[in-house]
Amino acid sequence: MIKHNNLLRFISFLAGFASGFFGVGIGGIMGTYLVAVEEISPRKAFSTLIMIMTVTSLIGFIVHLTNTNAYSSVWLLYAIFLFIGAVSGSQIGAYISSALDLKTLRVYQGWIILFLGFFLFLGNIVKI
């Protein structure tokens, strides 16, 4: 049950802004908020976020496919490998999530978000 509705709306707005403006993943921001502030279990929070991101990505893919000349063989080759990587990554992530206890999962989540934030920050400064 969500405890802070108005705060959640504000954080959601800021997360969406940061995601669009800086290229930071909204899943990391909202997932951290749901786990740390709302005290929702990491499994439930990130399962919900992954479901929402999957639907959003699918809609974006369909819109992109219908509005661009995306039917070239090179583009479809990238799409096939992207699909295989996404499915295998989600299965590995689900296995790791179910195999670890919640405390260890929270520690790994924190480190991954710190590393991703650092490399995104570094990439924007150095222009890799």
Image (tube, grey):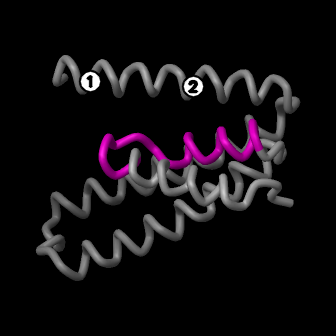
Amino acid at circle 2: Ile
Q: Main secondary structure of the magenta part?
A: helix
Name above or below for residue 36 compared with residue 27.
above
Q: Mark 1 or mark 2, which is nearer the start of the sequence?
A: 2
The answer to whether the residue labelled 2 contacts the one labelled 1, judged by CB atoms less than 8 Å apart, is no
The x and y percentages for residue 65 are 25, 75
User: In percent of the image, x 57 and y 25: which residue is there?
Assistant: 112
Q: Is residue 108 left or right of residue 102?
A: left
The x and y percentages for residue 15 are 49, 49
Which range is magenta? 19-37
Amino acid at circle 1: Gly
Q: Is residue 58 left or right of residue 29?
A: left
The circle drawn on residue 68 is none
User: In percent of the image, x 33 and y 23: which residue is there?
Assistant: 121
The answer for how far apart the CA atoms under marks 2 and 1 are is 16 Å
The x and y percentages for residue 64 are 25, 72
Q: Tag 1, which secondary structure? A: helix
Q: Is residue 18 left or right of residue 107?
A: left
The circle drawn on residue 112 is 2
Total marks shown come to 2
Name above or below for residue 2 compared with residue 119.
below
State the residue position of label 1: 123
